[in-house]
Amino acid sequence: QSYGEEDTSHVMTLSMELAQESKMNGVYQLRNNTCYIPYYVGPYITYPTESQSTCPHDDQATRIYRTINGTCNNILEPQLGQSNGRFKRYLQAEYDDGYSSPRIYSRNRTCTDYVIYRKCIKQLLPSARTVSAAIHTEYNISSPNTVMLMQWGQFLDHDFTAAAIVQPAEENPCCNHSDVRAGKLHPDSFISDGQCFPIPIVQDPSDRHFNRTCMNFIRSKSIDDRIGFFRPREQQNLLTAFIDGSNVYGSDDTTASHLRGQNGRMKTSGNNLLPRGNDGDCIRDNAPYCFAAGDERVHVFPGLTAMHTAFVRLHNYLVEKFDNHTTWDGEKLYQESRKVVGAILQRITYTEWLPEILNSYTMHQYRLNEGGYQYNQNVNPSISGVFGTAAFRFGHSLIPDFLVIDGQEKPSRKLFNNPQHVFTSLDSIVANLLSNPAQMRDRFVSREVSDHLFERNGIGFDLPAFNIQRGRDHGLPSYNMFRYFCGLPEVTSFNSSYLGNAGPSLQSVYAHVDDIDVFAGGMSEPNLPGSNLGPLFSCIIAQQFQDLKYGDSFWYETSDQQRGFKAAELASIKKIGLSKVLCQVFNLVKVQRNPFKLVTNTNPEVLCDSLDDIDLTPWY
Ligand code: HEM
Ligand SMILES: [Ca+2]
């Protein structure tokens, strides 16, 4: 077994409750529909690994601290979870040509069956925009959770997933083709190594706002250029899979050293903000400059920029304290502080954030609660395609219509990629994350992102449509296949109660229940009691978080002598929550104990001073 293989073997040992023969025995064969010939891609053969690194046990550098690019976490297979590695798959890819071209056709085919020759009249899947316009409409219900629930989700996502795309040479390259202008699919959609896969916008009265016929979309990069060898195309994750603060420090050495300042500190700019960076997608209109961070998407939302700022400040706070009490050199100050920041990120995620997302039953079933940690070197910590491309995008449903900044409602469309308010109103942004409600986690999504994402000169984009199109680009099998993978009954009719109230809308766009895209179907499922997710996304997300915990040899609770914390240090870390961190780095006076929930009688505001201090005495 080797890096890049579909690795589900570990699931057997870790989650016997869920383990099902069907999903564990190698690659799952697609259900044989009347006219559907399943393409068998596999069994997953061994890929050559990109960088053959070795990690000798006696190498101090890789033994004690995480590497920046995530290698050497797993001693048997040092590449597991590294940046620029493959997304793993739970199910065989479903590409139209079997190995690379996107999934574009419906299961609904009319076929004439000959013994040697089978001729089918194919029907295209509905456009991703059509699906979005039918399913992911707007219906705002406020959630009992704060915008911080959304914001942590995005910040966390940027610690572990970023699919590489091919950088286009020109501005809007995929919508300029004559076929597209004639209302047809871009010719790249039919071939294995095409880069364009623009989303057709079908003009019909139900579509709300778009008076264009095409939304630009570029396919994710194939991990290597060997698609001609009949191996399924695989996507590349630019980030380290581990929750290791790579969003703060970077996922490669160049970025990391660029962000590092003097004497163990992280670089900052005026007013203790993030350091200056390249413009990239950032809108400079009213901002003096743009920021640099461990993940490039730092400007996507000012709340996100605020979280990046928080953890750079936390790092520097730790450095300062350590420096005052030890004789450590810059390297040690940096590494020890980075180790604590990583531990705090993990702990907030698993003990504060995940319990708002998954219910207590799932938390327990997947062993996601604090305590009882033991590293399992057979667990593949890589991010699964369906997690990054579909399930973990559930957070797009939480996005609010606006933030209140300095007492004014600023529609989200004015905030994307715009760092302006971070310079003038950072405290107000943070206060709003903690006091305004997120939207409910349901299939409905704010029009701010479904019509007005990245809007410039009246041209906006549709985020749910991107998610659906990205799933097809990555060859994700459909919703039902993943239901099957999770041991959930497959949906056999659009009337199924599993689909909540989305059945009729789904039926209005899809020809066959097996066509339902995994994002659209998973988002349609009503939340399980006590959770913010339906059964399918609960399964996929819980499985991924299990892998990220038990497959991480630097997990903050590890008892490993060199990688872990001393008992007293760990006890100190276990007293730190997000509220305290925010108090510390933003000089708050009071905050609610659970920052992911609105202030109520059961979640009152308390004085920051009444929360346990970040106690570093065990370190010195
Ligand atoms: C203001 C809020 C947000 C904006 C504007 C935003 C925007 C985007 C965009 C434009 C993409 C790329 C879509 C594509 O081309 O495939 C994306 C991907 C993604 N988003 Fe969000 N998002 C937001 C919040 C969130 C939240 C709250 C979560 C999770 C809780 C999340 C999870 C993800 C994930 C996992 C991806 C895939 C990343 C990758 O692998 O490349 N996002 N988002
Ligand atoms: Ca990471």
Image: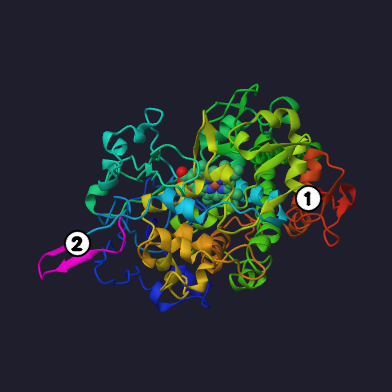
Classify 373 as above or below 576: below
- Mostly what secondary structure, the magenta segment? loop
Residue 293 appears in view? yes
Ranked by sequence position, the earlier of labels 2 and 1 is 2
Amino acid identity at mark 2: Cys
Indicate the position of residue 473 as horizontal and vertical percent values. Answer: 37, 49
Distance from the alpha carbon under mark 2 to that under mark 1: 59 Å
Q: Nearer the viewer, residue 162 or 527?
A: 527
Q: Nearer the viewer, residue 543 or 416?
A: 416
What residue do we see at 39% from left, 47% from top? 52
Residue at far front of view = 205
SS of the residue under disc 2: strand
* Stretch in magenta: 105-119
- Ligand 1 within 8 Å of the CB at mark 1: no
- Ligand 1 within 8 Å of the CB at mark 2: no
Indicate the position of residue 475 as horizontal and vertical percent values. Answer: 36, 55
Which residue carries the number 2 mark?
Answer: 120
Would residue 306 be found to the left or right of residue 94 on screen? Answer: right
Amino acid identity at mark 1: Ser
Q: Nearer the viewer, residue 550 or 499?
A: 499
Classify 362 as above or below 417: below
Res 570 quadrant in image: bottom right
Q: Are marks 2 and 1 in contact (CB under 8 Å)?
A: no
Q: On residue 579, which mark appears?
A: 1
Q: Residues within 10 Å of mark 1 (few under 14, many from 20)?
A: many
Q: Residues within 10 Å of mark 2 (few under 14, many from 20)?
A: some
Magenta-colored stretch includes residue 112: yes
